[in-house]
Image: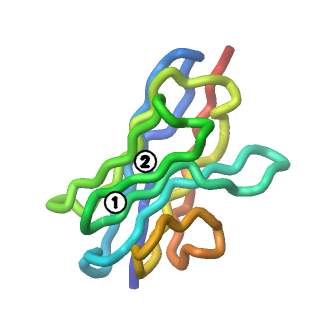
Amino acid sequence: QVQLVESGGGLVQAGGSLRLSCAASGRTFSGYAMGWFRQAPGKERVIVATIKWSSGSTYYADSVKGRFTISRDMAKNTVYLQMNSLKPEDTAVYYCAARIGDSTYYVREYDYRYWGQGTQVTVSS
């Protein structure tokens, strides 16, 4: 059974940085795609970034391009989301997700089978 555990959320001022971590366990993740999503109050859950575990290829939502970086440490089975130049509109619960198969960039919530519990990120103005 795949388990995903996020950490690293918190309160930060606008312009600041945070790094989220997602510790993955339960199997080897070759051929998997890993994603970070976020959900603001009253809004749907949307993609932030994805990474293909094997190749390291990445995709970013337009709203975070140039500010956020997704990466993975294969030895630690951990996916990271480095968030720089944070804005109040980045405030949301951030979720880590995983799915089998990485033939393309999967950006929909229903594309992913496995989910973490979420971590709150709050950016103050």
The residue under the point 28% across, 54% down is 72
Q: Is residue 36 left or right of residue 100?
A: right
Residue at the image position 39 percent from the left and 85 percent from the top: 1
For mark 2, does the 10 Å Cα neighbourhood hold few (<14), some (14 to 19), or many (20 or more) residues?
A: some
Q: Position of residue 17 (x, y in %)?
A: 45, 24
| Residue 16 picture location, percent across and down | 49, 18
- Residue picked out by circle 2: 7
Note whether 117 is above or below 70 in the view shown: below
Are the residues flagged by discs 2 and 1 in contact, CB closer than 8 Å?
Answer: yes
Count of numbered circles on the image: 2
Quickly name the residue at label 1.
Answer: 23
CA distance for labels 2 and 1 = 8 Å
For disc 1, the neighbor class at 10 Å (few under 14, some 14 to 19, many from 20) is some
Of the image marks 2 and 1, the number of the one nearer the N terminus: 2
| Up/down of 53 relative to 122, above or below | below
Q: Secondary structure at mark 1?
A: strand
76 left or right of 40 in image = left
The amino acid beneath tag 1 is Ala
Q: Amino acid at mark 2?
A: Ser
Query: Of residues 21 and 63, which is closer to you in this image?
Result: 63
Q: Position of residue 91 (x, y in %)?
A: 66, 34
Q: Residue at x 62, y 25 (%)?
A: 123
- Along the line of sight, which residue is nearer the eye, 30 or 78? 30
Give the quarter of the figure containing the C terminus: top right
Most extreme residue toward the front is 104
Residue located at (73% from left, 44% from top): 40
Give x and y (percent) for residue 42: 84, 48
As drawn, 56 above or below 7? below
Query: Which colour style is shown?
Result: rainbow
